[in-house]
Image: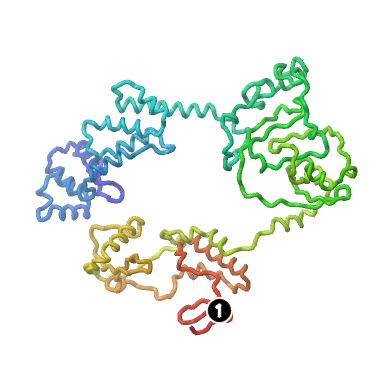
Amino acid sequence: MATHGSVGEFAPGKETWLSYAERLEQYFLANDVQAQEKKRAILLSVCGASTYQLIRNLVSPQKPSEKTFDELVKLVQEHHQPPPSVTVQRFAFHSRTRKEGESIANFVAHLRELSEHCQFGDTLNDMLRDRLICGCNDDRLQRLLLQKPSPLTIDKAFTIAQAHESAERSAKDLLRPDSSQVNSLKGRRDPNFSRDRAVSIECYRCLGAHSPAVCRFKNVACSFCKKTGHIARACRSKRGPVQKDTHKSTHTTRRKNLRDTPKRAHQITDSEADHSPNESTYTLFNMNTNRVKPIQVTVNVNGVDITMEVDTGASVSIISESTYRKYWEKGQAPPIVPSSTNLKTYTLTVVKGSGPSLLGRDWLLKIKLNWEKLHLNYLQPKALKLEDVLNRHNVLFKDELGLVQSTQAKLHVDPQSQPKYFRPRPIPYALRGKVEQELERLEKAGIIEPVEFSEWAAPVVPVIKRDGTVRICGDYKLTVNQAAKLDTYPLPRWMISSLNWLEGKSVSEEEHLQTLDKVLSRLKAEGMRLKRDKYAFMLPKVEYLGHVITAKGLHPS
């Protein structure tokens, strides 16, 4: 008789015993296997040698054939996954809340997983519904669910929650601004900034509450002044002349320092007609970042040397009113004449003040600066410091296990050797807690793993470290070392190959730090980890193996 499908051996690392037993049940159903004796025989035949040996140990002194299929499945299940505490499982269930960015479907699915061992019985659906409402982390959704009349089932609550989630997502997509308008600026937000104030933009084209860039009247001609770009309702000529700031219409234009008012940047213009149809007004946030030292040059203006900042982002060169009054006394100052130049900016506010003088592009086109000299003066890298080098490679000193990437360790064992199994040695009572704690840490870190059976076994040797913790060692000289072909070379070959590129010696502190930076970079690339408190840097002398190494050479200690 042909069979449908196959089960295969149980692989503990790839699936749980419960999942394996469920696959067996499906196999029995597909092949119409109903007799308990036949189910037991199939289980013992396909489970694999290691699992069969485990079953024999669990039923000893009886034989596996003396137990039923259900009894064997239960024995192995309790061995691999002992029944957890109901109290602890219920605490985990009632403590579960929806994480940021987690979908409703994933949240409910995890709640069902946590409820597996809670033994809620007939109240399971009510518990799931209550946890969904209380732990959804969405006050709007909570109010929506609490408004529903009873009885509110988990299925109905789940449907409402998913619909609410979908609606919220769709609303965000509809309100999302055009990504082509402005790039994102990241920085700390000004505490005095109000979101309501930021979004309330008045369009100067139609007086509507939107950006002028998206206004449908930006290509319409005004019926009052006949100019293009606005309608009569927003026409400034119709409303009367706009009072102009006298300080804007002069050659000497003033710029207020951004640090004085990190609030908002407004558009500055004399007349609406000068606006380009593609111009927009944006609200900026204050970014609190480390200020870069400005590049300054000295420029002779009307016989007076003035220090100015080189600013290629400024279209014109400016000085503040205070600078103007400082260098030229009354009657000797060059005249300030009206100018037709209209300054427009989205990041700077032109007001009275004492900000720095800027050397803009208009003067830079006329004045030929020595850019090579400026580059050397302002862009020369700062000298290396030990703390900078160590901070650059701080991942090397993380409190975790490293993993060498360039090579793989191999242990060659004589195939003719016989396995050796030694019983564990007694551990002093005072060290048992520390040994168990260290074994648990090693297992969680993936350094060791528990096994059911092994032909090789070496006794554990605990070693007390300086910080009071325990290092777990194995007395392998009794077992593997006798059968292994060991390399007697004093250093690992991968370490020699990794550091053999270091040549010569450092003659200065700068060169020494550069060499140290190269060594740490190589070790970091290898995947190693170092214990920071075991290393000392920049010492005048080092004592090693009975000798003292100094700048003058090697001396006996």
Question: Could one spot residue 273 in this view of the protein?
Answer: no
Residue 335 position by quadrant: top right
Residue 281 position by quadrant: top right
Residue 116 position by quadrant: top left
Q: Residue at x 22, y 52 (%)?
A: 48
Residue sitting farthest toward the bottom: 556
Amino acid found under the numbered disc labelled 1: Thr
Q: Residue at x 53, y 82 (%)?
A: 554
Where in the figure is residue 498, as x and y percent of width and height?
Answer: 51, 67
Residue sitting farthest toward the top: 223
38 vs 140: above or below: below
Where in the figure is residue 508, as x and y percent of width and height?
Answer: 63, 71
140 vs 441: above or below: above
- So how many labels did they put on this image? 1
Where in the figure is residue 85, as x and y percent of width and height?
Answer: 23, 45
* Viewer-proximal residue among 340 and 52: 340
Horizontal side, residue 323 vs residue 532: left or right: right
* Element type where label 1 sits in the image: strand
Horizontal side, residue 8 vs residue 277: left or right: left
Quarter holding the N terminus is top left
Question: Could one spot residue 279 in this view of the protein?
Answer: yes
Q: Residue at x 29, y 69 (%)?
A: 461
18 vs 440: above or below: above
Q: Residue at x 67, y 42 (%)?
A: 260
Badge 1 density bin: few <14, some 14–19, many ≥20, Cα 10 Å: few
Q: Which residue is mark 1?
A: 550
Where in the figure is residue 552, as x and y percent of width and height?
Answer: 58, 81
* Viewer-proximal residue among 458 and 409: 458
Residue sitting farthest toward the right: 331
